[in-house]
Image (cartoon, rainbow, N blue to C red):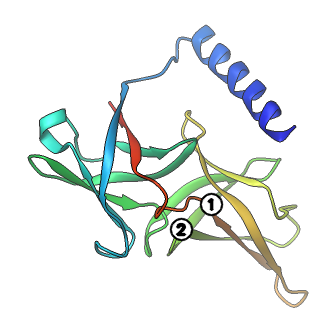
Amino acid sequence: LQVADRNSLETDNQSLKALMGRTQIGKNILVAILSRPEESPYDTLIVDGGNFVGLKLGEIVMAGNYEIGSITAVYPSSAEVTLYSSSGQKNQVEIGPNHVKAEADGQGGGTFKVTLPRDVSINVGDSAIDQKLSGNILGIVSFVDKNANNPFETVYFSNSINLTMLRYLQVIIQ
């Protein structure tokens, strides 16, 4: 039911964007993963393609419906992708059913942390999406740390992508 609901919302989203003249910008290029975090520097990937296929710095990298990172270095036949979950990365997100805007800090290993006021209603299973018009999913809330003595709560979410199982990614060419 959740997948059917997500597909219905995606169709509505695309129709609304087309109606408002905001159809997909750019095109997708399929790239193969050459090395993963256990083989390359922490929370980075090396993908094939590079300058040869027109990859450029800053382009968005997708794994299915998840936005996982961006191109941070381009070589003649390969490129480096830094994952948004990389330690020190800052991501502007909307989280939960009320689309609470927040800054998510990458924690490494596909996880993120957000600090919000305690009275904000965020629950395990809520989505965290990118604030850009694309509204790509960055992750799903896995834990909410509430402490009665603290006016803030810490929300943890992860992208639920197992990079060891992936062979290919999409790069959104702008």
Tag 2 secondary structure: loop
Horizontal side, residue 25 vs residue 54: left or right: right
Name the quadrant of the C terminus: top left
Q: Residues within 10 Å of mark 1 (few under 14, many from 20)?
A: some
Which residue is rendered at x = 43% and y = 74% of the image? 88
Which residue is rendered at x = 78% and y = 77% of the image? 152
Question: Residue 43: percent from the left, percent from the top?
Answer: 39, 70
Q: Hey, what amino acid is under mark 1?
A: Ser
Q: Residues within 10 Å of mark 2 (few under 14, many from 20)?
A: many
Question: Residue 161: percent from the left, percent from the top?
Answer: 56, 58
Horizontal side, residue 57 vs residue 61: left or right: left
Report the disc number at residue 160. Answer: 1
Tag 1 secondary structure: loop
Horizontal side, residue 103 vs residue 73: left or right: right
Which residue is rendered at x = 22% and y = 41% of the image? 56
- Contact, mark 1 vs mark 2 (Cβ under 8 Å): yes
Q: In the rendered image, which residue does mark 2 sit on? A: 110
Q: Considering only order in the chain, which callout, 2 or 1, is on the residue closer to the N terminus?
A: 2
The image quadrant of residue 53 is top left
Name the quadrant of the N terminus: top right
Q: Hey, what amino acid is under mark 2?
A: Gly
Q: How many marks?
A: 2
Horizontal side, residue 127 vs residue 76: left or right: right
Using the numbered discs, state the Cα–Cα distance from disc 1 to disc 2 in whole angstroms: 7 Å
Vertical placement of 35 versus 87: above or below?
above
The image quadrant of residue 158 is bottom right
Which residue is rendered at x = 58% and y = 70% of the image? 111
Q: Nearer the viewer, residue 168 or 13?
A: 168
